[in-house]
Image: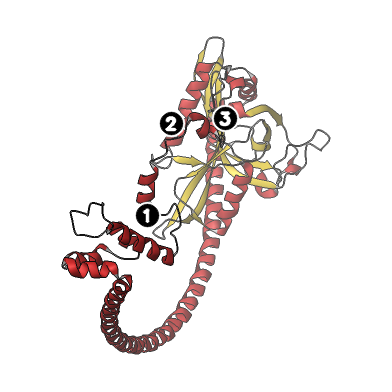
């Protein structure tokens, strides 16, 4: 018997850990469970040759399968990688085993591994199993890619069948496994099972750990639910939705006090009211000057004119300062004659226009010199671009020659890899067959020796 006993617990059965056994796993391609009215011996569409390990530590059982795929690592070297499929017991709805299976269900290649008889174990799942892959990406051969695709489909199915030798598990062990998946487990046992599974997952691939393939929104860590563990669920409080404040809410809360009218008008630069026409400004300025010369009115202590008045007449304070430096007689003449004041302003505007024209002429000359330099730079750039194009054409022709040589080498390499893949597949098949034959022979000899004893 390829299983060993590790002791027992009172009232809980005998624990065992079966050795790895070569099995055939079969399942429907669409991943759906088989209906009751379907024939039980129907041959499923997908078949995988895998290694199966089962153990039972009362009251927890484990069911794990693995298979090898072939490809290349990051350095381009050939490598063999193991892929695992773990079926947690609480994912299993029931197990159904049958002995003396009709050999018509298996191919001739499969029958070579079951010379001593075949046992069929049907897994009916509440949730799919977990496909465990390496953390890094895999670069696989086409045959191994098809195996990986079948395993990913297996990670979504609710039913599959295992065909294993009679000697892999005894009837008593199969009954223990069937009872373990249907018996209730305590919270402590579930925690121990989760710890063991996490330890197993972290120890894979040389201690790097594996990752669980996420299929159909499944989560490897989310194994327990409120109904299974018996815990109560607590509703999480959600924050209230944001409410848009009404338009008149600020008005009800109280509006800020309005600033002083004079302050606001001065701060906004007279943007509150539109300025009066220019003719009206001239009339108001002349009337203000006449009123200033009337008797009984105290004259200003400072001879500087009203800056705000001239600002409204499109004058700046710098234009007003020269008038303040003139003598009183010339100022009185200007105040008594508004036309002279306007002419003086026009003269200043003309002088400013001449200065602006001179500055514009200098800027145009500088712009012309900059354009000439830009034209010279453009000519140099065109020459450099032409030389670069010629060089690129030469490099492209050389690259085309290299591509043709590389393509021929790749075709040759692909042909060699295909031959090598076929050879490796044959070697793998021969290796597995030899291992199975040696294992069967040793087992038969041990059984014979035990019987003679």
- Front residue of 19 and 183: 183
* Mark closer to the chain start, 2 or 3: 3
Q: Residue furthest top?
A: 10
Q: Foreground mark, 3 or 1? A: 1
Quadrant of the rendering where the N terminus is positioned:
top right
Q: Secondary structure at mark 1?
A: loop
- Residue 269, numbered label: 1
Q: How many angstroms separate mark 3 from mark 1 (CA)?
A: 80 Å
User: Percent x, y for residue 165?
Assistant: 63, 36
Residue 133 vertical position relative to residue 295 in the rendered view, above or below: above
CB atoms of marks 2 and 1 within 8 Å:
no
Closer to the camera: disc 2 or disc 1?
1
Q: CA distance from mark 2 to mark 3?
A: 14 Å
Residue at the right extreme, as displayed: 37
Residue 88: image tag: 3
Is residue 112 something that shows in the picture? no
Label 3: how many Cα within 10 Å (few below 14, some 14–19, many 20+): many
* Residue 449 image point, x, y percent: 53, 29
State the residue in front, 216 or 311: 311
Q: Which residue is mark 2?
A: 199
Figure check: 130 above or below 56: below
- Which residue occupies 44% across, 84% down? 401
Instruction: Specify the color scheme.
Output: secondary structure
Viewer-proximal residue, 230 or 121?
230
For the residues labelled 2 and 1, the Cα–Cα distance comes to 77 Å
């Amino acid at each position: 018997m390829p299983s060993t006993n590790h002791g027992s617990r009172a009232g809980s059965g005998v624990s065992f850990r079966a050795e790895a056994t070569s099995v055939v796993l079969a399942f429907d391609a669409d991943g759906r469970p088989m209906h009751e009215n379907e024939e039980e011996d129907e041959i499923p569409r997908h078949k995988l040759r895998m290694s199966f390990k089962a153990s039972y530590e009362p009251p927890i059982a484990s069911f794990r399968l693995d298979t090898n795929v072939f490809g290349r690592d990051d350095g381009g070297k050939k490598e063999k990688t193991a892929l695992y499929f773990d079926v947690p017991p609480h994912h299993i709805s029931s197990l159904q085993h049958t002995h003396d299976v009709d050999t018509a269900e298996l191919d001739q290649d499969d029958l070579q591994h079951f010379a001593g008889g075949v046992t069929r174990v049907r897994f009916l799942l509440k949730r799919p199993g977990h496909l465990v892959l390496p953390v890094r990406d895999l670069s696989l051969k086409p045959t191994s890619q098809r195996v990986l695709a079948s395993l990913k489909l297996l990670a979504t199915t609710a039913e599959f069948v295992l065909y294993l030798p009679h000697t892999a598990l005894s009837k008593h062990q199969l009954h223990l496994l069937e009872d373990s998946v249907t018996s209730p487990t305590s919270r402590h046992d579930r925690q121990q099972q989760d710890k063991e599974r996490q330890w197993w997952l972290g120890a894979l691939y040389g201690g790097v750990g594996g990752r669980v393939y996420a299929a159909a929104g499944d989560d490897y860590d989310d194994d327990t639910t409120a109904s299974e563990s018996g815990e109560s669920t607590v509703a999480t409080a959600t924050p209230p939705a944001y409410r848009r404040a009404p338009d008149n809410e600020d008005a009800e809360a109280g509006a800020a006090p309005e600033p002083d009218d004079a302050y606001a008008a001065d701060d906004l630069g007279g943007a509150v009211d539109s300025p009066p026409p220019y003719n009206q400004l001239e009339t108001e300025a002349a009337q203000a000057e006449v009123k200033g010369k009337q008797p009984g009115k105290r004259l200003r202590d400072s001879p500087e004119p009203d800056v705000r008045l001239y600002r409204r007449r499109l004058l700046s304070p710098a234009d007003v300062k020269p008038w303040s430096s003139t003598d009183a007689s010339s100022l009185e003449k200007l105040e008594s004659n508004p036309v002279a004041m306007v002419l003086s302003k026009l003269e200043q505007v003309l002088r400013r226009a001449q200065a602006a024209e001179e500055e514009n002429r200098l800027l145009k000359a500088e712009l012309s010199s900059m354009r000439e330099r830009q034209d010279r730079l453009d000519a140099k750039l065109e020459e450099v671009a032409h030389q670069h194009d010629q060089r690129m054409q030469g490099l492209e022709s050389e690259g085309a020659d290299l591509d043709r040589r590389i393509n021929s080498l790749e075709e040759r390499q692909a042909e060699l890899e295909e031959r090598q893949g076929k050879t490796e597949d044959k070697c793998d098949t021969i290796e597995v067959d030899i291992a199975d034959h040696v294992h069967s022979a040793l087992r038969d000899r041990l059984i014979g020796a035990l019987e003679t004893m």
